[in-house]
Amino acid sequence: MRLDQISTRLFNSGALACHEQRVLRAWVQRRALDGGRRPAEHFLPQSVRDIVPALMTELEGLARLRSEHPGEDGSSRLLVDLADGQSVESVLLPRDGLCVSSQIGCAVGCLFCMTGKDGLLRQLGSAEIVAQVVLARSMRPVKKVVFMGMGEPAHNIDNVVDAIEFLGTLGGIGHKNLVFSTVGDARVFERLPKMTVKPALALSLHSSIADMRAKLLPRAPRISPEELVTLGEVYARASGYPIQYQWTLIEGVNDSEDEMEGIVRLLRGKYAIMNLIPYNTVAELDFRRPSPARATELGRWLHRRGVLTKLRQSAGQDVDAGCGQLRARSIRIDRRRPATIVETRA
Ligand code: SF4
């Protein structure tokens, strides 16, 4: 479901813009419609009040918690059921953050990611993206939303942009606390500067060498690392927020001296933060995580060479932390169940 479909239903019931905003704000901020002061009939026409209970029930059904997997770092990975029986992952992050999914599956097919294994299954509607925030807010406050879960946001840009505009206004989230994360796509650099709510931008680099990057991210647009950083720099200066470059650090793949020199060449002097994220080893994939000592050494080396570098861990790395792992595991479990049980759940 998309946000504009909700708006149309409210409009058809007789809602003016102010009524629509009141209903949608109540949904996304989990507030009572009457604000605890005056009854709803003081500010909503009867025809709107007639449809609100069923609408709210439907919106609650857009994202339901199937299971929660707390990590030791204060994060918690959520497996979330959608209304059609599909599932996505969201992650509650420390300090009131939330990582949301924008697609079921992903067409980019990064070699080190479970989500990319089966390609794209379907897009999430803008309301399904926002519904992940509403679900998370039933568990904890959410003041920051990063679009780093399942999917490539640029491949679902209309729905992601609508969700960001909504969250940055009725959702009450600060604009710099909305983070659009992408492998880099011309559409992103066209659309984001025109948005009313300008999100921060994270660019998944993973290699400074064009050929290696093309191998690791086989269906990412062919934008060279140099071009990507140039485009990123323009957006960083326009938005006022540094670009967060993402680098999944994989032993023997992109942790070489050449790669580190490449990062320095690309990012020194830029309005940027390099996030080194040691890869989480997954049984199904043939990549290895570098030792903590090696990751720390690389981070310090980059810092000394003038690149603002942060060593980050994937949230909840002590549970199934790689993006798409929870969903993949749940599907394997479902496949082992008798068909009748699966059908009942769906
Ligand atoms: S890492 Fe992101 S872009 Fe790459 S396949 Fe996974 S979800 Fe898609």
Image: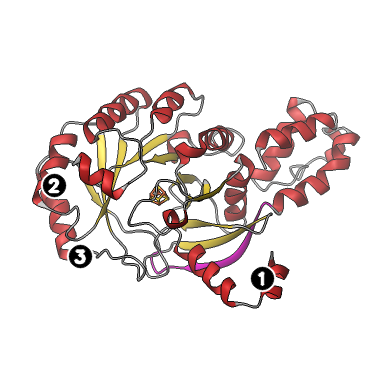
Crowd rating for badge 1 (residues with CA inside 10 Å; few <14, some 14–19, many 20+): some
Does 127 sit left or right of 278 as displayed? right
Kind of element beneath mark 3: helix
Residue type at mark 3 is Pro
Q: In the depicted view, which residue is nearer to us: 250 or 61?
A: 250
Residue at the disc numbered 3: 292
Residue nearest the observer in this picture, 89 or 72: 89
Dot 2, how many residues are within 10 Å of its Cα: few (below 14), some (14-19), or many (20+)? some
* Residue 207 at least partly seen: no
Q: Look at 51% across and 57% down and name the residue there.
A: 89
Where does label 1 land, which residue?
342
Alpha-carbon span between mark 2 and mark 3 = 17 Å
Q: What stretch is highlighted in magenta?
A: 62-73
* Picture coordinates of residue 322, whole percent (x, y): 39, 61
Which secondary structure, mark 2?
helix
Q: In the displayed structure, would residue 76 be above or below residue 137?
A: below
Q: Residue 206's spot in the image, x, y percent?
A: 26, 47
Badge 2 or badge 3: first in the primary sequence: 2
Nearer to us in this view, 135 or 100: 100
Q: Residues within 10 Å of mark 3 (few under 14, many from 20)?
A: few
Q: Residue 43 carries which label?
A: none
Q: Nearer the viewer, residue 264 or 208?
A: 208
Mark 2 highlights which residue?
260
Residue 245 placement (x, y as % from top left): 29, 42
